[in-house]
Image: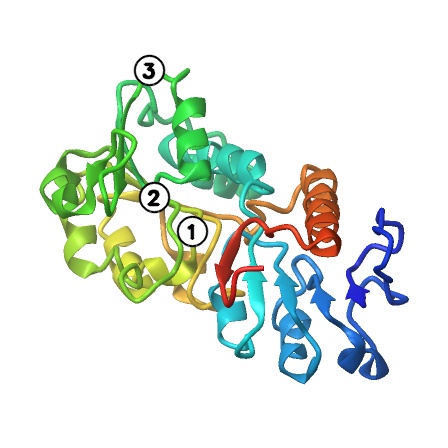
Amino acid sequence: MIWTQWSDLAIPAGLEHLPTNGIHPTPDQLEKITFYVPLYMGGKAAIEQIPLMKNLQVVQSPNAGFDDVLQVLPEGVTLCNASGVHDASTAELAVGLTIAARRGFAAFASNKEKGKWVHTRNTALADSRVGIVGYGNIGALIAKQLSNFSVEVIPFTRSGANGSKKMSEFDSLLPTLDVIILIVPLTDQTRHLMNSKRLSSMKDGATLINVARGAVVDTDALVKELHTGRITAGLDVTDPEPLPDGHALWSAPNVVISPHVGGDTTAFEPRGRALVESQLKRFAEGSPLINCVAGPAR
């Protein structure tokens, strides 16, 4: 039995889609589900029922990041992520936040609310050295999109694959970078990757962009650094998230914040549906699933 938010998917013979309200399974459906696709952008409520699905075999996450699902994934259940689905939307937001942060959009918005015309000369993206930390599908697409902006792109990975620099070189090159774009999964190794020491090592006028996970950046250290006026930032993710009312990041200068909308555009629907339909076809045929990130291969 399958549960997804969509009631009109192409379902292969031999599989059955449970009735869906498009939000979450009903309590009487939980033990029937073998293939589960949590509601996209459903947050904690979309995954907290997973341990109650006693016959569950596969969780197909609609997200590229999967650290939250790992915390509730039962033993023996396969977890697949949505690698590829959000590449276009996330990459374009990363570029948009970079331009917004470099060109002073935070101040423009503030002055607009005040009804003030304040002309300033801001920092161009052109001629910048851009470090992309994480060079998977999205990181590579960001690099491709930035190729039209007269910048030098320096990608970083742990292994140094595909022409990237190894992360062991990051600290030595960090002070030379004008822009750092974070697009890595949240792991024990990447948590607070941008800590107080690294933030203070950024060159004057540099920009930090986070389209990864909020905890990849030490929030308190970032707030402190933003208040020095030395750097700018563009954040699609924060720690904590959602960012609560009154949090110090809201009033920090030189930061553009979007509410975790990197992948949540009109581009998701066709790509998300296509991935799920493809996975269901494989599941019905007994063919290997793609994007398996945890649990047994199926």
User: With respect to residue 16, does 132 lie above or below?
Assistant: above
Q: In the image, which disc is placed on residue 150?
A: 3
The residue that disc 1 covers is 212
In this view, the residue in front, 195 or 34, is: 34
In the picture, measured across the screen, residue 198 lies left or right of residue 75, that is: left
The type of residue carrying mark 2 is: Gly
Q: CA distance from mark 3 to mark 1?
A: 24 Å
Q: Residue at x 71, y 78 (%)?
A: 55
Q: In the image, which disc is placed on residue 136?
A: none
Q: Residue at x 68, y 37 (%)?
A: 267
SS category of the residue bearing label 1: loop
Q: Which quadrant of the figure has residue 74?
A: bottom right
| Quarter of the image with the N terminus in it | bottom right
SS category of the residue bearing label 2: loop
Q: CA distance from mark 2 to mark 1?
A: 9 Å
Q: Residue at x 58, y 54 (%)?
A: 63
The type of residue carrying mark 1 is: Ala
In the picture, measured across the screen, residue 4 lies left or right of residue 260, that is: right
**Disc 2 vs disc 3: Cβ atoms closer than 8 Å?**
no
Q: Position of residue 177 (x, y in %)?
A: 20, 34
| Structural crowding at the residue carrying mark 3, measured as other residues with C-alpha within 10 Å and reported as few (<14), some (14–19) or many (≥20) | few
**Disc 2 vs disc 1: Cβ atoms closer than 8 Å?**
yes
Tag in front: 2 or 1? 2
Is residue 201 something that shows in the picture? yes
Q: Position of residue 93 (x, y in %)?
A: 51, 37
In this view, the residue in front, 225 or 11, is: 11
The type of residue carrying mark 3 is: Ser
Which tag, 3 or 1, sits closer to the chain's start?
Answer: 3
